[in-house]
């Protein structure tokens, strides 16, 4: 067995961020009566939110904005798309979203089964996530997958962010793992796959959405069950 330490990403890899965010935003949409305030199309609001969130996370990863700005601005910009310039509402939505989102527990199909399978084969499983410390721990606890992971390394806890080499080095040091016996599994080509490659780790690209990457990972799978063919 070449690999001993398997480092998973969390959001969009195991934990279905988009599905959980949609459920949370639907609850906020109803609770805050956003339709009466001018958000007349929830599905468009949700699509706008996802777009803004993705772009703002890229800016956060690259050091252009801080955590607090990301959290509020994704709501602010989504409201502005409906010509609503209400900063107080954006702040309230941000606070309530962050309280509610980690209570969701929708995982990708076969997530629990693959974690059980890998554990039964004596792999040591860990998480490397760019998420916030408190939020990410709540997610894995509420999804009842926390017991599968020996170490959870967050960007907050490591003072670094994927794809920076430092967060991978931090994770290796925290787990006592050697690069040659470690592999990174994630959905984000830049943050997870290219970041891990730059840090000297093999990678599994978990390509849930069937993208066509111009970088060749060590392995590519299109569903979590396919990991059984590698491990």
Image (cartoon, rainbow, N blue to C red):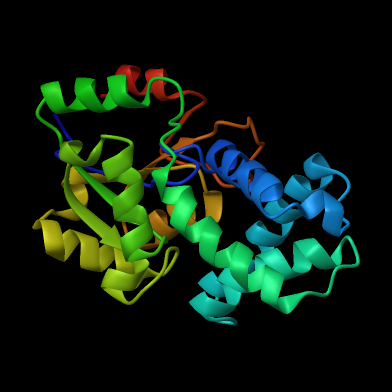
Residue 8 appears in view: no
Position of residue 152 measured from the top left corner of the image (x, y, whole percent): 23, 54
Query: Which is nearer the eye, 231 or 151?
Result: 151
Position of residue 96 measured from the top left corner of the image (x, y, whole percent): 53, 60
Query: Which is nearer the eye, 224 or 31?
Result: 31
* 204 on left or right of 52: left
Identified at 39% across, 18% down, the residue is 225
Position of residue 68 measured from the top left corner of the image (x, y, whole percent): 52, 78
Instruction: Tally the numbered discs.
Output: 0
Position of residue 153 relative to residue 19, above or below, is below
* 8 on left or right of 218: left
Identified at 59% across, 38% down, the residue is 23
Query: Which is nearer the eye, 13 or 226?
Result: 13
* 205 on left or right of 111: right
The quarter of the picture where the C terminus appears is top left
* 212 on left or right of 68: right
Identified at 42% across, 63% down, the residue is 162
């Amino acid at each position: 067995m070449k690999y001993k330490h398997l480092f998973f990403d969390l959001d969009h890899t195991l934990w279905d961020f988009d599905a959980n965010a949609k459920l949370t935003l639907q609850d906020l949409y109803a609770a805050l009566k956003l339709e009466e305030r001018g958000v007349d199309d929830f599905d468009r609001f949700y699509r706008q939110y996802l777009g803004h969130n993705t772009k703002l996370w890229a800016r956060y990863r690259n050091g252009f904005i801080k955590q607090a700005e990301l959290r509020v601005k994704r709501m602010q910009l989504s409201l502005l798309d409906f010509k609503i310039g209400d900063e107080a509402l954006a702040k309230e939505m941000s606070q309530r979203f962050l309280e509610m989102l980690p209570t969701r527990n929708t995982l990708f199909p076969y997530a629990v089964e693959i974690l059980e399978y890998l554990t039964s084969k004596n792999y040591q499983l860990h998480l490397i996530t760019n998420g916030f410390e408190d939020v990410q721990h709540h997610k894995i606890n509420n999804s009842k997958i926390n017991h599968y992971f020996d170490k959870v390394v967050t960007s907050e806890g490591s003072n670094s962010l994927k794809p920076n080499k430092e967060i991978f080095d931090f994770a290796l040091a925290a787990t006592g793992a050697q690069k040659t016996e470690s592999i990174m599994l994630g959905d984000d080509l830049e943050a997870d796959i290219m970041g891990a490659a730059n840090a000297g780790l093999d990678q599994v690209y978990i390509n849930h959405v069937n993208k066509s990457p111009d970088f060749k990972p060590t392995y590519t799978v299109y569903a979590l069950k396919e990991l059984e063919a590698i491990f």
